[in-house]
Amino acid sequence: MSELLRLENVFAGYGEAVVLEGISFSMEEGDSLALLGRNGMGKTTLLSTLMGAARHHSGALHFSGQDLAVVPAHGRAHLGLGWVPQERDIFPSLTVEENLTVVSRPGHWNLQRVYEMFPRLNERRANMGNQLSGGEQQMLAMGRALMLNPKLLLLDEPLEGLAPLIVQELLAIIQQLTEESGMAVILVEQHARQILPLTRQALVLERGRAVYLGESATLRDDRELLDSWLACGTTPAAH
Amino acid sequence: MKAIDIIHAEHRALGAVLQAFRFVLDGIRDGRFEPDFQLLAAMIEYITQVPDKLHHPKEDDYLFVRMRARIPAAAGLLDQLEADHAEGARRTAALRGALVHYQGMGASGFAGFDAIAGTYLDASWKHVTKEETELLPLARQSLTPEDWAGIDAAFEANKDPWSGPTGEFRALFSRIVNMVPAPYGVGDAGVPGA
């Protein structure tokens, strides 16, 4: 596997404000990384920096052999970055199928494969974006990102606000993506214990700085470390 | 994945279906949903087969055996949990029979099915809660690293909470998610006019 993404001592934020301080890590093609931390620690800012939506102050940002810092935000999807934002950003006045095809790029992922992964989207393909439930919107947001055929998929809290049944289904799909698709994935989540088994690496942010970078399995097995940084829940949903 | 993480993950997957089953029962009772027997049968298949075929055998054969040997004070708790597991087959048969009866009787059969399903759900949640709040903390506290090495290895061979050893439950879980109405699922089974 060759290197896909490398950050070296990256400082970034919004305007003059610096949120991320000295972030460094790298990923290979097909790699997976859990990006963890409590609210407001800089996880979404890191994804926004990769997508060009936050201000990159200094440090090296390399993606697929190119200097990402000089690529404008609108060019980053073409380079192979697929983003599923927390807000999902479904086009409300387009149908499900139009939402999927409006951004599609040639590659493994096409309408048929996305519909096989999310059969409900096929059933709802003629419905407008604003007629979907929260779970359907999240599936559409993930399907739309896959239609870009990205080399690196960025998932920003894809389980947030969803019922446990849908959460479990999306976790199984994310596991399939990380294990079988050959696509690299960065997964931002609050539910650390649920996503650490799905990823190879983990990066924990605290106040914009990296406090852990290493194997997900090592972090998963250290309960004290997890609890001190992340306040993890383990029990099933309340009934 | 460690054995305790696998048990937690399987409890979460099972709990999600138990919760959705309660939601569907409430909806039928309140008149918001019509009975969809394919959905009811699929949920009953999952909540009975996954514990009986996937989850409980691992606990009985590995975790409980080590705990009995290492923690004499756990005998009473383990007896209760093993009795629950053994009782599973009888409760499963009762629930399946109640569904067949409901399907045959139509609307007048719902009350009986609702009562048996409610008893099943209550017993399942009580069992899961007992394992989460009593069994697993005790196991974590009392078993040695050598105990865990053997248990983890046995669980690792069968670790996916959605699939089962040969993937037989993965499609069933997806089918349930795609049938249960929002907000618990993404489907519209039983929704009038859907």
Image (tube, coloured by chain):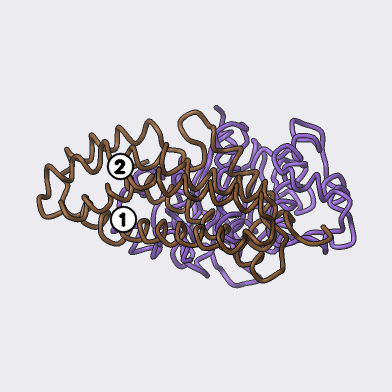
Chain colours: A purple, B brown
Q: Quadrant of the N terminus of chain A?
A: top right
The residue wearing badge 2 is B59
- Please say if A46 is above or below A3: below
On screen, residue A208 versus residue A156, left or right, reads: left
Q: Position of residue A48 (x, y in %)?
A: 65, 59
- Please determine if labels 1 and 2 lie on a single subunit: yes
Residue B41 visible in this rendered orientation of the protein: yes
State the separation of the CA atoms marked 1 and 2: 10 Å
Question: What mark, if any, has residue A2 been given in the picture?
Answer: none
* Label pair 1/2, CB-CB below 8 angstroms: yes
* Subunit bearing disc 2: B
Instruction: Say which residue appears at 79% left-offset and 52% top-offset.
Output: A74
On screen, residue B188 versus residue A193, left or right, reads: right
Instruction: Say which residue appears at 28% left-offset and 51% top-offset.
Output: B81
Q: Quadrant of residue A43?
A: bottom right
Q: Could you say which is closer to the camera, residue B116 or residue A208? A: B116
* Subunit bearing disc 1: B
Kind of residue sitting beneath label 1 = Glu
The residue wearing badge 1 is B131
Instruction: Say which residue appears at 47% left-offset and 40% top-offset.
Output: B49
